[in-house]
Amino acid sequence: MTLVILSKVLFSVAITKDEAFGYPGACPIWSPSTLTFLGTAQNPTSQVWFTGFNGIIGEVFYPSVDKAATVDWQFLVGDGANTWVDEEKQDTTSQVNLNNTRSLSWNITNKAKNGNYQIKKTIFTDPNRNTLIQQVTFTALRGTLDNFKLYTLYHPAIGNDGKSTTGYNTTYNGIGMLIAKNSTNGMASALASSLNFKKGMMSSGFVGHSDGWQDLKGGKIDNTMNWAYKSATNGNIAQMAMFDLSPYAKQKSVTFNLVLGFGNNETNAKKVAAETLNDNVPDMLSAYNAQWNSYTNNLNNFGGTADTQYYVAAMALKAATDKTSGAMVAGLGNPWGNSNYSICNPLGIEMQGGYHLVWPRDLYKTASALIVAGDSATASKALGWLLTTMQQPDGHFLQNAFVDGTPYWTGIQMDETAFPIILAWKLGRNDATTYTNHIKPAADYIVKNGPWTQQERWEENAGYSPGTIASEIAALVCAADIAKVNGDTTSETNYLAKADYWQGMVENWTFTASGSIGNGKYFQRIDDNGNPNDGHILNISNGGGSYDERSIVDTSFLELVRHGVKPGNNPYILSSIAAIDSTIKQTIPGKGDGWFRYNHDGYGETSTGADYTGAGIGRLWPIFTGERGHFVIASGGNADSYLATMRAFANSSYMISEQVWDLNAPSGFTPGTPTKSMTPLSWSMGEYITLLASNYTGKVMDMPEIVYQRYVSNLYKPHKDKTVDYNQASVQPGTALTIYYKGFLASSEQLKLHWGHDNWQSVADKPMLKRNDGFWETTISIPVSETALNFAFTDGNNWDNNGGSNWNETLSPVSSRR
């Protein structure tokens, strides 16, 4: 039933008291991470970042991109007779549009579900101050303004801390303000409006007890503002003020500016809020848009194929960059933030980091995307921060950290030590200081500790990961080139020898020939000990269960192609494509193909759609659609369909999420739309940029060319006129030797290399894989100290032993190259 408003505003006065009751307030939470808008000024002056969901402001970050200062900020709307109160984020339907297609300013239209009113907002930041601005028009769709009561409800969490905020109400130069400050460091916010707050109708209270929402909608509901507490000290607080609509009582609408200023203390917060409020707000919007327009105009447009999704993605990556340090965070939010915080989380995790942390892997992906887009300056500054802040004395890089370098998690992921080297090579950072202090220590760490990793890119398991090994190989080739520039030929030789050996051996460590999927031959997600046929048990995180490691697959082996380590037509890659497509691929009707991280992934919501709290069901990740598109391009194909799918996976405001719902989405959720984990994910946005560019140019644009030249352009190809072939240059002790066979057993269903050394010592059978050119191939590790290699071929029943002579190669002893 639709309510028709007839009554006028009843006179009400809140009871003014000093300190609010209910200290310290309810357990803090963050806002949902399903963002529909985000932004910041495109300059280093304004140090404020904003996000939004459900048509309202979510987490605002100040003074750095990793420090949340708010939980949310919205309107409450009531009728004049105090019979109902609406909460903007719950009781309106929201439409979000770019205010300018090349700027991160946003027009939000929130229409009441009861049809009584509408709220329009244009949201951006003051480009010259630390102030967030909302240009607001409140419209009575039924009746006039004297039929309504309008409130602003603000939930601060200054200093990335939801439990240590002090709030109070004050007047500054005649302007009513709600002040919030961190009780420890004094950082503060000041909320003010060009539409006056009603006298005596401002209140600061403790969340869940004496805050404005509880006053209007909690407990014994009377839809009336009864409390006007002057302060709430050192807790989880919220602040509310009622607007004075009386001067506009007979009008249908009122337009005003609502600002939130920030400062390192309350005085500065008040000052900037007042200055912004008294300045020319339309001019500020024009300047804000002009700065973003200037940025996007200087990006590569790839023959005009760059679309709105591309530009929003590029701006989002720029907006996820700290303006002082250059650090780039993984996302401006906390996954499932409105349930995963402190003791509210069943795991007891205090979610102060969320995704607004720096992971070297995510930074590499997003910085590489910006290089492709034409913004090498931002990538270079990010690299500088990475080298000086996250690298440890032994050469490795932290798993993740805050912008100031404080570690968050402390696992060691070898790809995260590899990626900074590759990024440095891309940016031409080959000076002596960078090499000596950063590149060489990182490369030496990889040589000493790789290819095994304590954690792979999903941060869960130890062992041999094809994706991690791909990045390690690429990093060592890049490090060798930088070593060469610096005259360090010894390191150059060592890095290349190690990279070459790993490039040849990666299948031996991670490709099973005895799997349970398809033909049983494919890359595993990870192998614990480098023997992919021993069937050891893999314990999957997030409640995923325990399985034979040979039965768990992911897409990370495609990184071997992405980094130029293997060609797209590599038989091991092609055999693995079939395995993942039959296991972790889904096609979403009307959208396209998506892939899970791996089978039995538990990182996601539950089967009912409830938030992840330590165990759940992993869903489809849009980055894998992008990665598959890059593989298609590397193989000579066209990725139009993958680009279209990534666009289809984005929400209506061009935000591409970490995960989208799969075909088994719970009731109320639509397959192919963002889940509640994180939207947008910087990595996802960057993947779209790189895929669009790669599709236009016909080559993978973030591939390190020097790696491709070494392993793909110069790949040894077996001679068509030979039945057995191999690269004579690789017939040395301590190397990985690939042997090709096309003899009379080539038509067999399976084939093995039967081999040993020094007159058939240490005999072993090595499975071979058939190539598209008719040859079979396999790679062996030649022992370091032996003098002869012996081999023949068998299909299990028949032998090709070179007419009884076998194949024998004399080895010249050399020092170990591994």
Image (spheres, rainbow, N blue to C red):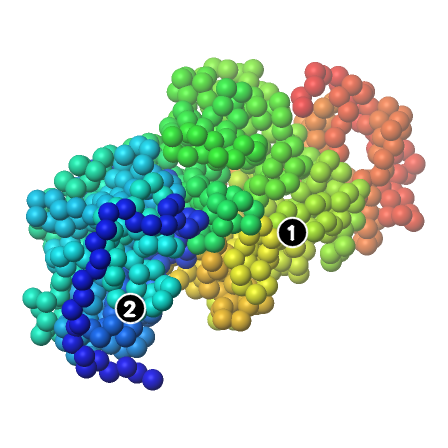
596 and 193: which one is in front? 193
**Drawn side of residue 800 relative to residue 624, left or right:** right
670 or 404: nearer the eye?
Answer: 404
Residue ranking furthest to the bottom: 1
Identify residue type, mark 2: Asn
> How far across and down, in percent of the image, does residue 502 sit?
65, 32
Above or below for 365 versus 759 = below
Residue under the point 34% across and 60% down: 214
Element type where label 2 sits in the image:
loop
| Of labels 1 and 2, the one closer to you | 2
- Looking at the rendered structure, the number of numbered marks drawn on it comes to 2
Q: Quadrant of the C terminus?
A: top right
> Label 1 to label 2, Cα distance in Å?
44 Å
User: Do the CB atoms of the residues marked 1 and 2 lie less than 8 Å apart?
Assistant: no
Work out whether residue 714 can be spotted. no
* 801 vs 144, nearest the viewer: 144
Quadrant occupied by the N terminus = bottom left
Instruction: Describe residue 271's horizontal placement relative to residue 310 as left or right.
Output: left
Kindly identify the amino acid type of the residue bearing the numbered disc 1.
Gly
Residue at 44% over, 30% down: 406
Q: What label sits on residue 223 in the rendered view?
A: 2
Query: Badge 1, how many Cα within 10 Å: few under 14, some, many 20+?
Result: some
Query: What label does residue 543 carry, if any?
Result: 1
